[in-house]
């Protein structure tokens, strides 16, 4: 089968199309013919081998040579112990806990990494879902303890995690304020945000408003700015942004300051699946690239201009 492979850490130039052995599913695995995948920040970290902790986990030369966590596709074969899926089923999931491998024609993964794809969305739309939506959900629900009628602020609302966070927050019945740049204001408003702040024109931390929950999906702000905008019992959750922003939430973690390192959980993806099936939320796809142009897709992803997700068609 064909796959986009890298043998050393570096720029997207390291990604090359190669012929590799097609996997055979083990007894508890599902072989998926991949129809679409998507790029996450974690893929970029793995490609670059930075921050350095990546190399401690993935080796000083990459052990996992095929990146790609988010996949959507069709079941081609199942191991003898697989109960949930059969040949022909349409599925999607985050396979990062199963060794990655999404930027390829096929992958074999444990069935608990996958859920059924709702019939009302495309493979491309499904591939944009898993890691980013579950990160948003875990940040809001597990760390942020989101409740109906709360005032929630999403910083970095136009990116992969941010677009999901706005919509998932709304599904909990909250009042959502989203922060983004000028060119993304209308797009974020269309996702249901009650208020949208253009950070090039207004500093949310200095307008006197207070929030019960702030989720930072992107950005590079001092921790004090977020804390300044919290209610007395409010919670700030950092799910992404600059390394400085991430580390400050780790170092100064407390009841009010939390950092999320998300992990794939089937129950969370099933929660999102139901919202998708009921048309409560939707994928935001900026651009789709064919698999052969994966290096270009990574360069575009790195540009900082992406609205929602960058998807790869297979």
Image (spheres, rainbow, N blue to C red):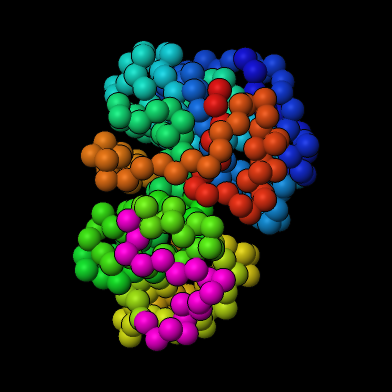
- Residue 255 visible (yes or no): no
The C terminus lies in quadrant:
top right
The x and y percentages for residue 213 are 35, 71
The foreground one among 286 and 270 is 286
The foreground one among 78 and 231 is 231
Residue 306 on the magenta span: no
Among the 4 quarters of the image, the one containing residue 130: top left
Among the 4 quarters of the image, the one containing residue 118: top left
Looking at the image, residue 122 lies above or below residue 154: above
The x and y percentages for residue 285 are 49, 40
- At a point 32% along the width and 64% down the height, the residue shown is 194
Count the marks: how many?
0
Residue 204 on the magenta span: yes
Q: Give the range drawn in magenta.
A: 192-209
The N terminus lies in quadrant:
top right
Q: In this view, does 310 lie to the left or right of 14?
A: left
Secondary structure mostly taken by the magenta-highlighted segment of the chain: loop
Looking at the image, residue 95 lies above or below residue 215: above
Q: Is residue 195 left or right of residue 239?
A: left
């Amino acid at each position: 089968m064909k796959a986009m492979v890298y043998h050393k850490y570096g720029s997207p130039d390291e990604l090359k199309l190669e012929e590799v052995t097609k996997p055979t599913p083990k007894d508890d695995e599902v072989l998926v013919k991949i129809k679409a995948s998507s790029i996450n920040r974690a893929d970029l970290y793995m490609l670059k081998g930075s921050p350095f902790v990546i190399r401690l986990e993935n080796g000083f030369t990459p052990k996992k040579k095929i990146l790609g966590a988010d996949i959507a596709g069709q079941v081609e074969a199942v191991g003898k112990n697989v109960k949930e899926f059969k040949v022909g089923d349409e599925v999607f999931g985050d396979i990062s806990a199963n060794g990655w491998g999404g930027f390829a024609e096929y992958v074999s993964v444990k069935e608990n990494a996958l859920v059924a794809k709702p019939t009302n969305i495309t493979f491309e739309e499904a591939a944009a879902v898993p890691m980013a939506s579950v990160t948003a959900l875990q940040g809001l629900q597990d760390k942020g303890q989101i409740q109906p009628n709360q005032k929630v602020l999403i910083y970095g609302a136009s990116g992969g995690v941010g677009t999901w966070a706005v919509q998932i927050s709304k599904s909990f019945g909250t009042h959502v304020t989203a922060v983004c740049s000028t060119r993304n204001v209308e797009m974020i408003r269309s996702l249901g945000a009650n208020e949208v702040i253009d950070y090039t024109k207004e500093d949310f931390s200095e307008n006197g408003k207070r929030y019960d929950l702030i989720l930072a999906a992107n950005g590079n702000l001092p921790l004090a700015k977020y804390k300044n905008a919290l209610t007395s019992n409010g919670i700030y959750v950092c799910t992404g942004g600059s390394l400085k922003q991430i580390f400050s939430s780790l170092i100064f973690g407390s009841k009010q300051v939390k950092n999320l390192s998300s992990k794939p959980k089937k129950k969370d993806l099933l929660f999102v699946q139901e919202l998708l099936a009921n048309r409560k939320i939707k994928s935001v796809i900026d651009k789709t690239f064919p698999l052969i142009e994966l290096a270009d897709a990574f360069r575009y992803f790195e540009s900082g201009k992406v609205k929602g997700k960058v998807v790869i068609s297979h």
